[in-house]
């Protein structure tokens, strides 16, 4: 009796107390669950609007939105560089009736405005001279350029700036209605980040075309205005077109119409100047192409001109007949961006250049598909040639 | 060492004691701070890739924009970010005053907001009302309350479907209707967006109420595309409130399966039993007492109030007017933006209230309610009239009847008394002279009796008391 066994104490006193404690703790934690709603049970829970006596509150009074500071930010502590001054509110209210906007086969006579858009990686003076020799009235032409955000772009921009200043400070009649130059948002978007050799390898096509599509969209949706009737996509390396290019192409009065892009070169075999097809993105769909597409994963694309992807599509480049009528047309399913005229309404309806595989097509070819989905027809002019710069 | 240390300490001590020390010290610190600021500033200035910026200020009709300046700051109102406010309108004259009231109360710096409207296929005076309201708005005496540039576009698309609530919300009408609305939105968006815009805000005109800080509230999340939750108030007989916009949702397996089973041009629309997608809707995720800052990733979005960075639209995202992944318009805009790698987010606990427009069933019910109310009113009028004629035409005898009633019935129930043999009727058959005498004419005025109810009552009371007494006697 005198000696207390420590083992007994453990079993007889400590263990029961511990068990009791465990049981209690379980019950206590249970009762905690019920007291989540400020100690009220779920059935007594009141909705916020009952407490705040109105339905018209964007959020509960329990929370508050951050307090906003309206003091203007400066980019730099010492060098005050505000990117833009406040535009003074205009007292006038602009009103445009887009119902009167038209795009017809008599574009020049009807004073329809044309927007010429060019994503420009390198500036070729021949391109600019070709633009200058177009016979379409310049007061009806707007130009738009987008330039990559890199050193190369700087060079292009300087060259372009010099030429533009020459033209736009000339006498009034020879000025273009408006010229807009955009600089891309970031260097990763640059559409010429690859050198000329890589540019045409299949592996990098998807990424390159995606960036090209992005720059086209950025250009298009920043510059298309309320008076634009036609949009001409003209690549910066198209250096030779007929002077009546715009009149000829608008004459067909088609939603989308593409000229055939060829290239002049010196034929080593026949030892004389010759021409060869350049742009293979103008094509009509083939059963093989469709079958290829149906077997592809969602994120894969089909591009023309690669042996790995033989589509057997009829390519417009191969439909050129030297003696054929330049105004003959053919139906197409994919177009290139070399020299393609689009009615502004097609773009306004939403047809853009997919930066992602759209029916396994991307950029201009995806654009043609999207326009078709919107119910527009796509045409090509196999015998109407424009010429690409020869690297 | 020790000596050195001591010397050093004492040197400091000596210096500390000098009275010049404090000003010199503070001066040095100030100089250091300015130096650091200068250096850090010039470093940040110099390390920025120096891009060539052409100067076309002296060249007419030429504009240069660096898109990097307009990518949208999460504190856009401080960074001079311009917002283009796009509003598609159709037969919206009645809604415009409410819309402009909300607009004028917005806290985002007004001169950084450009307003653009597309008026299409309107049979009412939408354009006239719009111009009046805009003139009012821009003639505000406080110049800071005026808005930036304002553009009104007109374009008719020819419309197959009526604009009443049930016309618009019927199942069959959805596909073609959504595609048409998408076209309208694209026409507006493509002309409204200028290179110098950083944010694009799409708003339906029929919003009942929303916070004045709506633009800041959406912008500060710094997402590519963001939408609030949209609910609407209801009349009490329909249950007070209801989620309105079911177009904001997250994709589900059911939805994807359904999409696969439909043809290329089909358009799935949410909220119709024909297309059960089992998608979680933003509207139903609302917790009225929850944190308004909570974000939810979405796949399809509704068009009541969309805030997007301008770069989203610049990159080519738009409201597909064709069936894109079996969707059209705003829902497809969400899907398209996601496909193009932009973030699409909804705020489940932050609510914008849409107006209540009754459906045709509601209208029928309301008509019935109105008829019922009129009927009850008519009935009440008749009742009132009857009551008045009753009052005028009939004297109220109810109080006296109480007594009369008692007296009349007093002798009727004989049975009880006869049964108990307690009461025997005795009839006096004898004739007396008194019976043949003329009754003495009573002068009614002699005892002040003028025949009024009070007198009558008094008389009656006496009689009753007498009779009661007799009765009691008999019973005893």
Image (cartoon, rainbow, N blue to C red):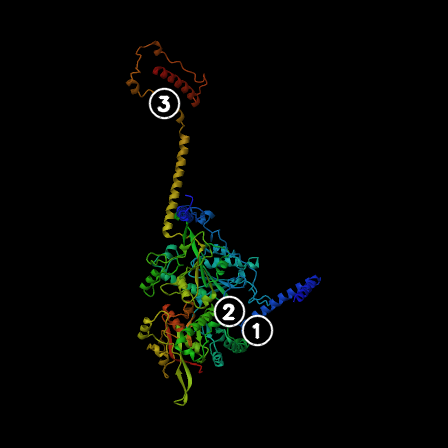
Q: Which mark is residue B68?
A: 2
Instruction: Please identify the residue farthest to the front as the structure is shown.
Output: A2
B110 and B218: which is toward the camera:
B218
User: Are the residues flagged by discs 2 and 3 from a single subunit?
Assistant: yes
Q: Quadrant of the N terminus of chain B?
A: bottom right
Please, what secondary structure does the residue beneath circle 3 have?
Answer: helix
| Mark 2 or mark 3, whichever is nearer to me | 2
- For label 1, the residue is B58
Crowdedness near tag 2: few (<14), some (14–19) or many (≥20) residues, C-alpha within 10 Å:
some
The residue at the far left in this view is B419
Q: Nearer the viewer, residue A357 or A218?
A: A357
Distance, label 2 to label 3, CA atoms, is 103 Å
Labels 2 & 3 near each other (Cβ < 8 A): no
Residue on which the image places disc 3: B406
Label 2 vs 1, first from the N-terminus: 1
Chain of the residue that carries numbered disc 1 in the rendered image: B
């Amino acid at each position: 009796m005198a000696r207390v066994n420590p083992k007994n104490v453990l079993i007889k006193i400590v263990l029961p107390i511990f068990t009791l404690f465990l049981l209690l703790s379980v019950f206590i934690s249970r009762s905690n669950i019920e007291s989540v709603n400020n100690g009220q049970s779920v059935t007594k829970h009141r909705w916020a609007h009952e407490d705040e006596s109105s339905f018209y509150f964007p959020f509960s009074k329990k929370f508050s939105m951050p307090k906003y500071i309206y003091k203007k930010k400066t980019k730099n502590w010492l060098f005050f560089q505000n990117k833009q001054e406040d535009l003074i509110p205009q007292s006038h209210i602009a009103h445009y009736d887009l119902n009167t906007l038209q795009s017809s086969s008599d574009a020049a006579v009807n004073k329809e405005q044309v927007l010429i858009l060019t994503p420009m990686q390198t500036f070729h003076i021949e391109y600019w001279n070709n633009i200058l020799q177009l016979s379409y009235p310049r007061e009806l032409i707007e130009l738009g350029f987008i330039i990559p955000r890199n050193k190369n772009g700087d060079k292009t921009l300087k060259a372009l700036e010099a030429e533009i200043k020459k033209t736009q400070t000339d006498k009034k009649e020879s000025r273009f209605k408006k010229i807009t130059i955009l600089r891309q948002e970031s260097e990763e978007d640059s559409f010429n980040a690859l050198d000329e050799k890589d540019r045409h390898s299949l592996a990098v096509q998807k990424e390159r075309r995606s960036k090209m599509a992005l720059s086209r969209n950025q250009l298009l949706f920043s510059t298309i205005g309320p008076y634009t009737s036609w949009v001409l996509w003209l690549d910066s390396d198209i250096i030779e077109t007929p002077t009546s290019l715009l009149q000829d192409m608008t004459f067909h009065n088609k939603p989308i119409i593409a000229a055939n892009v060829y290239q002049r070169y010196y034929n080593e075999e026949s030892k004389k100047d010759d021409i060869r097809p350049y742009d293979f993105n103008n094509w009509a769909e083939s059963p093989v192409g469709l079958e290829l597409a149906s077997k592809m994963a969602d994120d894969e694309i089909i591009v023309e001109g690669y042996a790995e992807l033989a589509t057997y599509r009829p390519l417009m480049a191969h439909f050129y007949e030297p003696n054929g009528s330049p105004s003959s047309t053919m139906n197409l399913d994919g177009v290139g961006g070399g020299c393609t005229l689009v009615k502004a309404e097609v773009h306004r309806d939403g047809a853009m250049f997919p930066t992602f595989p759209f029916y396994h097509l991307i950029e201009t070819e995806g654009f043609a598909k999207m326009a078709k989905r919107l119910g527009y027809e796509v045409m090509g002019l196999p015998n109407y040639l424009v010429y690409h710069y020869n690297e | 060492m020790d000596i050195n240390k001591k010397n050093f300490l004492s040197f400091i001590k000596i210096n500390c004691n000098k009275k010049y020390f404090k000003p010199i010290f503070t001066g040095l610190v100030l100089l250091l701070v300015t130096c650091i600021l200068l250096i850090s500033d010039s470093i940040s200035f110099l390390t920025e890739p120096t891009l060539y910026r052409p100067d076309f200020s002296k060249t007419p009709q030429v504009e240069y924009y660096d898109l990097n300046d307009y990518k949208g700051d999460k504190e856009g109102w401080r960074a001079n970010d311009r917002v283009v406010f796009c509003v598609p309108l159709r037969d919206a004259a009645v809604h415009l005053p409410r819309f402009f009231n909300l607009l004028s109360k917005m806290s985002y710096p007004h001169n950084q907001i450009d307003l653009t409207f597309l008026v299409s296929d309107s049979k009412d005076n939408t354009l006239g009302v719009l111009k009046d309201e805009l003139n009012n708005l821009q003639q505000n005496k406080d110049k800071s309350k005026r808005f930036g540039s304002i553009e009104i576009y007109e374009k008719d698309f020819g419309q197959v479907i009526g604009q009443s609530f049930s016309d618009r919300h019927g199942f069959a009408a959805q596909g073609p209707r959504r595609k048409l609305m998408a076209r309208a939105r694209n026409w507006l968006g493509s002309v409204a967006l200028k290179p110098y815009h950083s944010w694009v805000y799409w708003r339906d005109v029929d919003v009942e109420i929303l916070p004045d800080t709506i633009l800041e509230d959406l912008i500060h999340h710094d997402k590519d595309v963001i939408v609030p939750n949209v609910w609407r108030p209801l009349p009490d007989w329909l249950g007070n409130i209801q989620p309105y916009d079911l177009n904001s949702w997250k994709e589900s397996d059911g939805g994807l399966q359904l999409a696969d089973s439909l043809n290329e041009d089909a358009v799935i629309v949410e909220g119709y039993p024909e297309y059960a997608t089992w998608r979680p809707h933003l509207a139903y995720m609302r917790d009225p007492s929850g944190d308004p800052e909570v974000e939810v990733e979405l796949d399809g979005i509704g068009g009541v109030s969309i805030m997007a960075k301008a770069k989203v639209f610049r990159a080519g995202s738009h409201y597909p007017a064709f069936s894109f992944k079996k969707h059209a318009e705003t829902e497809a805009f969400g899907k398209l933006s996601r496909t193009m790698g932009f973030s699409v987010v909804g705020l489940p606990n932050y609510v914008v209230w849409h107006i209540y427009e009754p459906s045709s069933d509601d209208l029928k019910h309301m008509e019935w309610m109105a008829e019922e109310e009129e009927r009850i009113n008519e009935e009440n009028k008749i009742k009132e009239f009857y009551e008045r004629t009753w009052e005028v035409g009939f004297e109220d005898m109810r109080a006296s009847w109480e007594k009369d009633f008692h007296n009349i019935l007093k002798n009727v129930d004989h049975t009880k008394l006869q049964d108990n043999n307690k009461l025997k009727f005795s009839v006096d058959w004898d004739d007396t002279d008194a019976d043949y005498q003329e009754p003495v004419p009573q002068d009614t005025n002699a005892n002040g009796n003028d025949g009024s109810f009070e007198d009558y009552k008094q008389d009656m009371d006496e009689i009753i008391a007498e009779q009661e007494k007799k009765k009691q006697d008999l019973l005893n």
